[in-house]
Amino acid sequence: MTRLTGGLIDRTKPLNFTFNGASYQGFEGDTLASALLANGVQLMGRSFKYHRPRGVFSAGSEEPNAIVELRSGARQEPNTRATVAELFEGLTANSQNHVGPLHRDLLAVNDMFAPFFAAGFYYKTFMWPRAFWEKIYEPLIRNAAGLGKLSMLPDPDDYDKGFLHCDLLVIGAGAAGLSAALTAGRAGANVILADEDFALGGRLTMESDPLDGEDAQVWVAKVKAELESLANVRIMPRTTVFGVYDHGIYGAVERVSDHLLTPGDKVRQTLWRITAKQTVLAAGATERHIPFADNDRPGIMLAGAMRAYVNRWAAAPVKADNDAIAIFTNGDDGHRTALDLIAKGAKVLGVIDSRADAKALGSYEVFAGATVTGTKGRLGLKEIEITRGGKSTWHSVGALGVAGGWNPNVHLTSHHRGRPVWDESLLAFVPGQGGPKGLIPAGAAAGKGGTATAMADGMRAAIAALSELGMTANEIALPDAVDASQAQAAFWHVPGKKRAWVDFQNDVTVKDVKLAHQENMTPVEHLKRWTTLGMATDQGKTSNISALAVMAELTQKSIPETGTTIFRPPYTGVSLSVLGGGDTGPLFRPSRLTPTHHWAEAQGAEFVEVGPWMRAQYFPKAGEKTWRETVDREVLAVRSGVGLCDVTTLGKVDVQGADAGEFLNRVYANMIGTLKVGMVRYGLMLREDGHLYDDGTCARMAEDHYVVTTTTANAGAVYRNMEFYHQCVWPELDVQLISTTDAWAQIAVAGPKSRELLTRLVDDFDLSNEAFPFMACSDLTICGGLRARLFRISFSGELAYEIAVPARYGHALMERLMEKGADLGATPYGTEALAVLRIEKGHAAGAELNGQTTAQMLGLGKMVSAKKDSVGAIMSRREGMGQDARRLVGLKPVDPTKQIMAGSHLFTEATAHTMETDQGWVTSSCYSPHVESYIALGYLENGDSRMGEIIVAANPLEGITLKAEVVSAHFVDPEGGRLRD
Amino acid sequence: MKFSGFKVVKEALTGYKGYGPLWRNPDPKPAYDIIIVGGGGHGLAAAYYLAKEFGMTNIAVLEKGWLGSGNIGRNTTIIRSNYLLPGNQPFYEYSMKLWENLEQDTNFNSMVSQRSILNLIHSDGQRDAYRRRGNSMMISGAGGQLLSRAEVKEMVPFLNFDNARFPIKGGLMQKRAGTARHDGVAWGYARGADMRGVDLIQNCEVTGFKIENGKVLGVETSRGFIGAKKVGVSVAGSSGRVMDMAGMRLPIESHVLQAFVSEGLKPVIPGVITFGAGHFYVSQSDKGGLVFGGDIDGYNSYAQRGNLPVVEDVLEGGMALMPMIGRARLLRSWGGIMDMSMDGSPIIDKTHIDGLYFNGGWCYGGFKATPAAGMTFAHLLATDKPHDTAKAYRFDRFNRGYVIDEKGVGAQPNLH
Amino acid sequence: MLIPHPLLGLRDSQEFTYLGDASLMNRPDPSAPDAEAAFCDYVFLRNNPAGVHRELWFHEQGDRSWLIVTRNTVTHEILGAELATDVKLGGAQ
């Protein structure tokens, strides 16, 4: 155990956990990383490429090394940073990306071959023989690559998404964020304070500096209590603001129950979309390291992280209590770590400071003008080599802190592609102009990282943000604090022959950067892509600037001239589950149910997804062995008796107004204005580019009132399009539109006995052919006063009607029709029979109206009226469309027992089947119980003049080629007598 | 310098001293026979093929940023030849054949990996449409398979088969489809073009065209005027901006498409999989990241970034289709600007300005086209005649009524 | 994105369906002698500016009004929104 005294852990609440199967104990307030360190565990993982042994490197979300598979079973979570995994009772974690035990990873052999795996090596080899890439090389690479493992089981937890709005969003609850939130909160603004940590305070929890002469936690607790007391402030710990989107919208993930063994009745995480009028970015800064030879051993970590572990978590970063700790720094910040270590009673070897004039700030040795030039210790640091003035000495240590300066966390400021700018006095990139509107960086994120300065800056930022909103905020009394010295030298890496890591996880070394330079991959994006620098799970948070500095040295340019990198969302990894919002499985999309859905369910119907709808597909009866048997029965029932089908899903648009007829003349290709009241007309709509858009019926209910129907698929789009022409193109027309698709239940009553059945329902209404002929329509009442609409239209080719009642009566109407039609053999039918009936009749549906076809191709070219203008009329006459000779035909297989599959291509007999000889395609096909043969519809070159010809329907995809006779598309009653009787 | 396994070993043992620059950084000459505007995948491929296949080397590629910084640097790496229409399918199949020999041709491993694409089917109508498309693939020699639900389940059992809003009913597969390492494609072409004498000029932004009497004479750039007998513009994403300098309006809108990559995972996704009932497609890179995307955001944009609703939409689709990826994390998302054309198909054609040629309108499908777009654009630039496989990609197809509309949604770019 | 609906205030862009350039409101005269060419330009060609763009959004999940939104395509900043009908009837295009 290397647990020290003090810290922000609750020693009354011990927590048991396992890592790689071994049991350990930590305390509430620990992270997995701090608890492991406190148990003397340094080795936590392996690197990506060379499988080098690695230990924890940081104390935050920038961690490149200590990433583990957290939990097990379906909750297994790969690539979890141990540094931010909150410890809980029963936590299990395993290291990842190794073969065999962690301390004896077989893939560590890669490290021996490292010279072969230099930057970009794979672009230069594995090319011969050609077939070997996919068969041999790539599978080897793939299996060796990757990090953690998925469980391959569905995520069992629940997720949620929500919306929040505020005047001021404060991102980060450190010194700057707390003072910003308090300033704005006291001013009465609606404030959201979000922090990725589970504790408030940021670096204040990790530094030893007092506030107002006492422990900083006293002040943090006071501020927290006051913020909690303010109804206008919402504190959101465990919440990462991961992205900045347009107009003040921020994406954030709240880890609601990741600190629990299981979420219980809670969600695991919530995706918040926060709309903020103003935002203060107080995200702090990330420490950087200094590459030197063999700088990646377990036990080597950022000096600031070391302070965090000893101060906040009372965990010494060594295996055994008496192991010495050294610090390697290029500035004063490293010395703070030495002082804190000493204060906690740790054994400090000294501070190796690259500056020749470095002085000790306490009682420890300073190696001024010295660097670390080598390390030993395969699974944990044992010795370091200190070189000064050309003289090297080895020293025994158990840990080494590296302090290379701090990079402001500018990430969110560049999400709108704003570029950070170089601050030579800070030796760091700070937020530049062109950041997201309303986002004000403050504190360390703005390069103002001293405690006193950060607090004042947070307050300033909040006052400025609120003044943008016309709100006045007053200055608050800030506690006495000091700014620790940030003096440092521009010292970026220790030159040497051995490998010095820049990007730990992806194993990018200074040598790789040099090779990229040698190969002219010097633009920063080339450097990153050639070497994979910054592409690991830490997104280069600890490596990008160091690499830039090395490249700058090589190109003899300044760092800002060499380039900068901008960051993209998310700030840290976000689970795919929470981004999906939890609507998985059947909840992926809403299911729209028709008014007769529950009735159909009770009849044992099979259902099918039709766009957003669930529709009855067919209604099997006891004893029917196949779906075909059922569908054939339903089809024949319509042809010989009467069938009932819910057609509510067809779109309905109510069109009213003095100019309704004129408006419809313009949106329909054919003439509508001449339609008599009480009559229905089939109508074609074109897109403005002249192609077929939709078809349906248009019924004139009154002088100034029409009801338009659309296909199910286009119901929304056609209505939107009609509103476009109404509002944007011809607003001067007196017309009003409303979609009534959901308002009316509509049932098709089809078959020779349909009139007889309907006669039994209507109130005093003459259904005779004379009084209510084919294509008639009327308002009426049925069943003793129920408001209804009746249309004599037919999709099946039989005598048929569609009857509409207010949607809430749809179920009752279906029951009544079945009851009254029992003796007539009334038969419910589903979408399968509906399709067979319309194919037999040669009516077009979605497969024929697929957006690539024209009225001419349907054989309806003459419907595009030349007497008037309408949408698409002019463009439908362009050369290429006029010359298109494909026409809709019927197809009968020469062998009636063979199905011509829709999607087959059509060819003239005895031609090769190529793109050039292609003559068309099969759109729809089915078995026709009426024709007693399989039949099909299709578009065929010059089809209308090829009746009787035997052609070939080729389906090489399934190895089927059939001969078929070209016939009329109207397999049933081509003269149309039946529907007019 | 020829790359080979032997070379890699030799350099590893001798400290990489033999590796030189992948390409030069030349200063622009006063004039070239051909200038290609745009050092993305298509521009570099065109330069490479002009040099290699047409023997033309007095050529410059002008790139405003770094080589490969166009959409070749920000796509989801899919290659396929599974189109429906005769204007498209022969072109993409030609491209696939070029992919199949790319590395041997350029002597650069672009990691072309024919790991297959599987388009999932969720309804009978969709199966019919895919059958029609699959048969186009068959008769053009691209190959394809129509899979049953059981066959799909055997192949990718981790998909959601049992508890889905839109159950999987089958799939259309092209085994020859797959992925390629996108940056590697750009670099392979760049290195090959440079080796043959093409000047690749980075940080050189074209700021105007010099056009006199209806003929182009050269381009104004951030590095001065550069003369040219012919100028080929290949700047997908910026087509509107660049051609505006030549006074041309295009049948193109610029839209943003977001793309995503997860943290690295041990291999789970064998090929490319597309969801047929939502906007989600995914593959897994050799490095282990799940590379995925969905639909464009849907509004005109040059911002190279998108918004949350589409992020959520993509992951809703992803989680509905493969709920076992949920505990992995999104590592990075980004946006690219797409030339969304009026029929969803590209343009490779001369313009009405003598000597000015255009390649663009690739929507979100330009990556897979890179070899063929380069070759056919080179053919057009060198011979003034369209290549046989690209002859449908004319400007005048719109006005004459010969659109190539795979989706059948008409002149509304955000629906393609 | 948030769209400042002239009647309803700021609304999330997810409530809307996007169409495209507001020039689609200027349907050419179908009786003009060069109508086909004018329609081809109208249907197929776009200015596609990198900068300020007037564009049509339909409040599909709202009050079903078509809006002309003036938005910068480089920054996504929205400069204003008007009811399309008002603009068309006002003749101010």
Image (cartoon, rainbow, N blue to C red):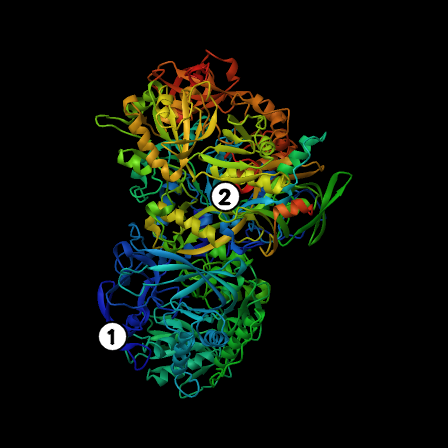
Q: Are marks 1 and 2 on the same chain?
A: no
Mark 1: which amino acid? Lys
On residue A13, the disc is: 1
Label 1 marks a residue whose chain is A
Mark 2: which amino acid? Asn
Give the spatial CA distance, label 1 vs label 2: 63 Å
Quadrant in the rendering for residue B172: top left
User: Does residue B314 appear left or right of residue A687 in this picture?
Assistant: left
View extreme (right): residue: B213
Task: Please give the residue where the numbered disc 2 appears in the rendered image.
Answer: B107
The correct choice, above or below, for A103 with respect to B258 in the image is below
On residue A379, the disc is: none
Helix or strand or loop: what does disc 1 sit on? Answer: strand
Label 1 crowding class (10 Å Cα cut-off): few <14, some 14-19, many 20+? few
Residue A652's x, y, as percent?
47, 35
Residue A92's x, y, as percent?
25, 63
Image quarter hosting the N terminus of chain A: bottom left
Quadrant in the rendering for residue B197: top right
The correct choice, above or below, for A598 with respect to B237 in the image is above
